[in-house]
Amino acid sequence: MSDMRLHILGCGSAVPTPRHNPSCQVLERRGELMMIDCGEGAQSMMRRMRLRYNRLRHIFISHLHGDHCFGLPGLLSTMALHEAGGTVTVHILREGADLFARMMEQFCGPVSYRLEWDILDPAERRVIVDRDDFTVESFPLYHRVACCGFLFREKAKPRHLLGDMANFYGVPHYRRQEIRMGADFVMPDGTVIPNDRLTREADPALSYAYCSDTMAAKRVAKVVEGVDTLYHEATYGDDNAALARKRGHSTARQAGEIAAMAGARRLVIGHYSKRYNDEEQLRREAASVFAGQVIAANEGMTIDLGNGDIAGA
C-alpha cells in the first residue's frame, strides 16, 4: 500500500441520481485527509467510508457550481458538532469564501476548530500548499464559469538506509539523514563508501491531478505533464460530443486524449451525465485513445495511487 490513496465519494454531474452523488473526492496521504470538491452527500459518504472528520485538514473547491460545493456548509457544521480541532483550510474562489463564511456565521457561530479561507485566482497557476515533502498547485481550467484544477505532488523521497551496512561501516546516527539524501560516507581514515553501498532506491514520488469541469485543452495536458494519475471529467460519450462543447465539458474520449498527451500512467474518469446508466461505454471510449489504466470512478471506491489497486465499490 502506498502513501497516497484516493477515495471516491461522488462522481455524478449536476443532477444527483439513485446511482451517483455529486462530485467529491478525498485524497488520503499518511493519514491526513484532503477533500476535493464537496457536493451534497459528502459528509454521509465520509461516515460510510470510515473517513474521520478530525483528519480532514484541507478542502479544495474547484468552482462555484452547486454540484461541487453545496455539501460544504453542512460538512463544516457537522465537524463543529464533532468538536474537531486543529485548522481546516478551504481553498476557494473569493465569492465562495464570502458566501460560505456568512453562512457559517449565521448557522454555526463560533466553531471548535480554526477555519481559514485561502482565495484562489482561477487565472493563475499557484502553489497553494508547500511542505518539505509535498505540494499542491492550482491551475486554470476552461469551463462556463471560473474553474481551477489541482495538482498534488510528493517531492523526491529520501533513499532507504541499509541499517546493517550503516552499522558495519560505523556511520554515526547524526550522519544518516544526509546519507539518505544521497551523500557518500567518508570514514575517519579517508576511505569513501559510495552511497549505493549504504542505501537502496527511494520509493517513487507520487502525483495526482484533478481536472474538474472543463473542456478538453492542450494547455491542461501541458500543466499536468508527467503526472502519475489524472482525474479528468468525462461527462458525456461520443454520442453527445456537441452537447459537451456547448456546456463546457469533455467527452470520455477527450479525457483519454488529454491523459495520453500528458503522459499519465493512469486515468480516472467521472462527473457522469445522468443520461448514462452504465459507465463502461465511457471507460471504453477513453481507453480507445489512452493505453494506460483507465478507471471509471464509482462511489465507495478507493484507489491506491501507487499501484492502481482498487478496493470497494
Image: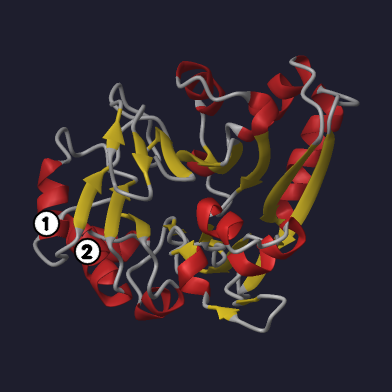
- The N terminus appears in which quarter of the rendering? top left
Q: Position of residue 260 (x, y in %)?
A: 23, 71
Q: Residue furthest bottom?
A: 190
Query: In front here: 269 or 186?
Result: 186
The three-letter amino acid code for the residue at tag 2 is Gly
Query: In front here: 226 or 166?
Result: 166
Q: Position of residue 200 (x, y in %)?
A: 44, 62
Specify few, some or many for label 2: CA neighbours under 10 Å numbering under 14, 14-19, or 20 or more: many
Query: What colour scheme was applied to this rendering of the protein?
Result: secondary structure
Q: Which mark is residue 285?
A: 1
Q: Which mark is residue 256?
A: 2
Specify few, some or many for label 1: CA neighbours under 10 Å numbering under 14, 14-19, or 20 or more: some
Q: Residue at x 51, y 65 (%)?
A: 198
Asked if marks 2 and 1 touch (Cβ < 8 Å), the reply is yes
Q: Quadrant of residue 19?
A: top left
Q: Residue at x 75, y 48 (%)?
A: 97
Q: Quadrant of residue 239?
A: bottom left
Residue 176 seen = yes
Q: Residue furthest front?
A: 189
Residue 141 seen = no
Q: CA distance from mark 2 to mark 1?
A: 8 Å
Q: Residue at x 32, y 74 (%)?
A: 262
- Which tag, 2 or 1, sits closer to the chain's start? 2
Query: In front here: 252 or 230?
Result: 230
Q: Residue furthest right?
A: 110
Please give the count of numbered marks on the rendered protein: 2
Assign a secondary structure to mark 1.
Answer: helix
Instruction: Say if 195 sits above or below 256 in the image.
Output: below
Q: Position of residue 75 (x, y in %)?
A: 65, 27
The three-letter amino acid code for the residue at tag 1 is Glu
Instruction: Say if 147 sits above or below 54 in the image.
Output: below
